[in-house]
Image (cartoon, rainbow, N blue to C red):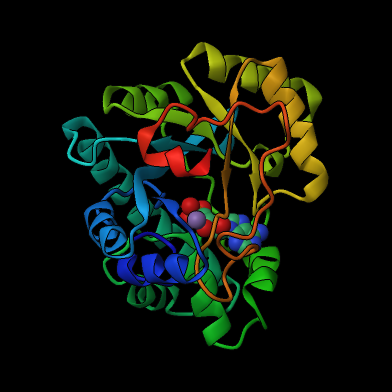
């Protein structure tokens, strides 16, 4: 329901076909797909875990925090995401203005049409730009148009790390720092972040993910251990042609990692 290509039902069917037995859906700033995905998971005998991926601004950088086991009906969560959705719409208009100056007209309407009922993300703009023939694929679009310093990039202020962790905790969830290897932080800031994340109640970091290169698995396994954080794993699957990694294909967590799901009955099939 955010930037994936498949509907919740299609996604779950795809996961089943790949042999996935335990699945979390983690849309960006959005929980409206969870009930549909859960119902589909029951049909396919997949254990389902509610999830969400919250956008956060920390030291002027965008980070993503995954909330697992959140209550999709939690009022504070729904109110916060409604605000984020409105903020994303304003941001989308600014992105379109930037792209117009770079010679790409009609991007707001074009991306909106691709997004349908989903929240507006950079992925929708990227798909529109490819469709218009301004770039050959999504990767090139991001490089040329959608990252810092490029015409379609907008410096948006997301919620704070503390707000995100409070929302996750108060809705019964567990906070996981998503793909830490993707942030351009450097040694000192990475250590500051992990320390702050844990002190604010964060439980785990993603160690093995489709957004990490294999050498980063061990690097973040060590950091998890050092900061007394558990480890998580995720494909970051977005649909055919829009993903680094197919579902159900990642290696297991390195030995010594404590899986964030270790005491969860719904994940007992992973032990
Ligand atoms: P947004 O939350 O609107 O900034 O959009 C985030 C989406 O853009 C996520 O699905 C990311 O996976 C995707 N994304 C971010 N950077 C890149 C990149 N360099 N190449 C491809 N996709 C990206
Ligand atoms: Mn995404």
Q: Is any part of residue 194 visible from this angle?
A: yes
In this rendering, the answer to whether 259 lies above or below 122 is above
Q: Is 214 on the left or on the right of 143, as rendered? A: right
The residue located at (70%, 64%) in the rendering is 143
**Residue 231, x across and y down, in percent:** 60, 31
Q: Quadrant of residue 266?
A: top left
Q: Residue furthest top?
A: 199
| Residue 87 visible in the current orientation | no
- Horizontal side of 199 relative to 115 (left or right) equals right
Residue at 44% over, 38% down? 268
* Left or right for 152, reference 73: right
Residue occupying image coordinates x 21% and y 30%: 76
Residue 134 locus on image (x, y percent)? 62, 83
Give left or right: position of 176 versus 166. Answer: right
Q: Residue at x 57, y 70 (%)?
A: 242
Image vertical order of residue 252 relative to residue 68, above or below: below
The mark total stands at: 0
Residue 94 in the image: x percent, y percent? 44, 58
- Say which of 107 and 39 sits in front: 39
Place residue 240 in its image quadrant.
bottom right
């Amino acid at each position: 329901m955010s930037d994936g290509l498949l509907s919740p039902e299609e996604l779950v069917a795809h996961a089943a076909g790949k042999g996935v037995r335990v699945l979390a859906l983690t849309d960006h700033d959005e929980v409206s797909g969870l009930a549909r995905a859960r119902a589909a998971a029951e049909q396919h005998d997949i254990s389902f875990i509610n999830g969400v991926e919250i956008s956060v601004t920390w030291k002027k950088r965008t980070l993503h925090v995954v909330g697992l086991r959140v209550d999709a009906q939690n009022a504070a969560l729904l109110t916060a995401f409604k605000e984020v959705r409105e903020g994303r719409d304003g941001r989308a208009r600014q992105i379109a203005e930037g792209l117009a100056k770079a010679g790409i007209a009609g991007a707001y309407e074009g991306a909106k049409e691709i997004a349908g009922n989903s929240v507006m993300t950079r992925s929708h703009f990227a798909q529109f730009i490819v469709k218009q023939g301004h770039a050959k694929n999504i990767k090139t679009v991001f490089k040329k148009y959608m990252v810092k310093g490029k015409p379609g990039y907008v410096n948006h202020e997301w919620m704070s790390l503390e707000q995100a962790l409070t929302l996750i905790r108060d809705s019964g969830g567990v906070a996981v720092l998503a793909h830490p290897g993707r942030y351009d932080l450097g040694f000192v800031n990475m250590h500051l972040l992990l320390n702050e994340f844990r002190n604010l109640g964060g439980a785990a970091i993603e160690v093995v993910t489709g957004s990490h290169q294999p050498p980063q698995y061990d690097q973040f396994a060590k950091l998890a251990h050092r900061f007394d954080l558990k480890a998580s794993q995720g494909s970051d699957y977005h649909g055919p042609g829009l993903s680094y990694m197919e579902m159900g294909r990642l290696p297991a967590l390195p030995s010594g990692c404590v899986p964030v799901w270790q005491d969860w009955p719904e994940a007992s099939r992973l032990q």
